[in-house]
C-alpha cells in the first residue's frame, strides 16, 4: 500500500509539472507568434529618454500592444496615422545605443525619430524652442590628454577635428558598416533627408505651448528651428563656460545625452534617423539656477506637438 501511495504522489507531481511545462511552452509560442506578427509590420520607431516624455505619447497611441525585450518595454500601435513602435531609450549614450539596436533587431523599422527635451547652447535660442538638427556628433568622444611642460600631449592614432576644452580633446569615431570592407572615421552623423525636408514644410505656422500653468509662462513665444548641428555626450551640462565652448567649437544649437548615439547606430544599420528636441534649459546659460525642473514638461509637450506634425506629414512606407 505504501508503494502504491508513493507512485500516486509521483504521478500527481508529474501531472503538475507537465501542466506547467505545457503552459510555459504555450506562452512562449504565443509570444513568438506575437513577435513575428509585429515584425511583419513596417514601423517608425519613436523614442524618448524617460517616462515624462514617453507618457504623453502613449496617451495618443491607438491599438496599443506592449511587449518586453531585454527589460525594455516596446509599445506598438498607430500614432498620428503611422504604424509605430514606441519605447524609452533610457538616459545617456550607452542606454540609447542598446535600446536602438534591440529595436532594430526585433522590429521591421523604416526610420527612427527621437522626441524629447534637451539643453540649448545657441545663444539665439530660448527655453521652449524646438530644434531639428541636420547632423549629430558625439562631442565627448574624446581624449583626456596628459599635461606636459609644453602643453597637452595627444595620442597620434586619433583624429582631432576640433579644438580642445582643457584636457578634453574631441575626436572622431571609427565604425564599420555591413557590406563595407574599410573602417570609416567620422565625427558627424547625418539625419534623414526626407524627414528633414518634411519637417521644413510642416512646421510653418505651428503654435507651441508657452505656459506651464495659468500663473507660470515663458516671456516669449517658442519657435521651431530646422537645421544646424546637435551634439550628445554622457553628461548633464549646466556650465556656462562649457556651453560657450560647445557653441563656438561645433556651431551646435543643442546638446543632449542620447541623439548622437542613436544616430550612430542608425547610420551603421542604414536606417534613417531624425531627432526632435525641445529646450528645457540652457545648459548653464540661464541667469541664476537651471530652469530644467520648471520647464521640462512644457518642453516635452512642444516636442510632441512638432512630432505629431512630422508623423502626419511623412509618407507611408508603401508611398516611398
Image (cartoon, rainbow, N blue to C red):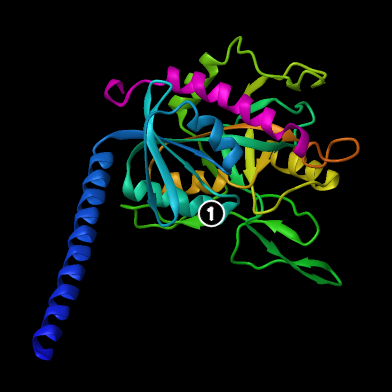
Residue positioned most to the front: 1
- Coordinates of residue 115 in the picture (x, y in percent): 55, 34
Query: Does 94 lie within the magenta span?
Result: no
Query: Which of the 4 image quarters holds residue 267?
Result: top left
Can residue 231 be seen here? The reply is yes
- Is 217 rendered above or below residue 167? above
Residue positioned most to the right: 288
Report whether 246 appears left or right of 229: right
Foreground residue, 303 or 161? 303
Counting the numbered discs, the total is 1
Q: Give the residue at x 67% y 38%.
A: 118
Q: Give the residue at x 52% y 47%.
A: 89
Report whether 222 appears left or right of 159: right
Quarter of the rendering occupied by the C terminus: top left
Q: Which residues are magenta?
A: 293-320
Foreground residue, 77 or 189? 77
What secondary structure do most residues of the magenta stretch adopt? helix
- Coordinates of residue 181 in the picture (x, y in percent): 34, 57
- Coordinates of residue 99 in the picture (x, y in percent): 46, 50
- Coordinates of residue 286 in the picture (x, y in percent): 85, 35
Residue positioned most to the top: 205
- Mark 1 residue crowding within 10 angstroms, few (<14) / some (14–19) / many (20+): some
Quarter of the rendering occupied by the N terminus: bottom left
Report whether 167 appears left or right of 30: right
Foreground residue, 142 or 299? 299
- Is 19 rendered above or below residue 115? below
Q: Which residue is mark 1?
A: 95
Query: Which of the 4 image quarters holds residue 216?
Result: top right
Q: Give the residue at x 60% y 45%.
A: 137
Q: Secondary structure at mark 1?
A: helix
Can residue 227 be seen here? The reply is no
Amino acid at each position: 500500500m505504501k508503494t502504491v501511495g508513493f507512485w500516486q504522489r509521483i504521478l500527481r507531481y508529474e501531472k503538475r509539472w507537465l501542466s506547467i511545462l505545457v503552459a510555459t511552452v504555450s506562452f512562449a509560442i504565443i509570444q513568438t507568434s506575437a513577435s513575428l506578427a509585429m515584425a511583419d509590420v513596417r514601423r517608425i520607431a519613436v523614442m524618448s529618454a524617460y517616462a515624462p516624455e514617453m507618457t504623453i505619447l502613449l496617451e495618443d497611441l491607438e491599438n496599443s500592444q506592449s511587449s518586453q525585450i531585454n527589460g525594455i518595454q516596446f509599445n506598438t500601435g498607430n500614432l498620428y496615422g503611422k504604424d509605430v513602435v514606441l519605447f524609452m531609450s533610457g538616459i545617456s549614450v550607452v542606454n540609447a545605443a542598446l535600446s536602438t539596436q534591440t529595436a532594430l533587431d526585433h522590429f521591421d523599422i523604416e526610420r527612427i525619430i527621437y522626441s524629447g527635451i534637451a539643453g540649448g547652447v545657441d545663444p539665439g535660442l530660448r527655453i521652449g524652442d524646438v530644434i531639428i538638427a541636420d547632423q549629430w556628433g558625439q562631442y565627448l568622444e574624446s581624449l583626456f590628454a596628459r599635461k606636459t611642460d609644453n602643453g597637452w600631449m595627444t595620442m597620434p592614432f586619433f583624429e582631432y577635428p576640433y579644438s580642445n576644452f582643457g584636457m578634453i580633446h574631441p575626436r572622431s569615431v571609427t565604425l564599420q558598416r555591413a557590406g563595407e570592407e574599410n573602417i570609416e572615421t567620422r565625427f558627424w552623423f547625418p539625419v534623414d533627408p526626407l524627414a528633414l525636408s518634411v519637417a521644413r514644410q510642416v512646421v510653418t505656422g505651428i503654435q507651441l505651448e508657452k505656459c506651464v500653468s495659468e500663473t507660470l509662462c515663458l516671456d516669449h513665444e517658442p519657435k521651431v528651428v530646422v537645421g544646424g548641428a546637435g551634439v550628445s555626450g554622457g553628461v548633464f551640462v549646466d556650465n556656462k563656460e562649457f556651453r560657450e565652448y560647445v557653441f563656438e567649437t561645433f556651431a551646435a544649437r543643442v546638446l543632449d545625452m542620447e541623439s548622437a548615439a542613436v544616430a550612430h547606430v542608425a547610420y551603421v544599420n542604414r536606417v534613417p534617423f531624425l531627432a526632435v528636441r525641445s529646450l528645457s534649459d540652457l545648459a548653464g546659460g540661464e541667469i541664476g539656477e537651471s530652469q530644467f525642473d520648471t520647464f521640462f514638461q512644457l518642453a516635452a509637450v512642444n516636442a510632441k506637438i512638432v512630432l505629431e506634425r512630422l508623423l502626419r506629414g511623412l509618407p507611408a512606407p508603401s508611398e516611398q
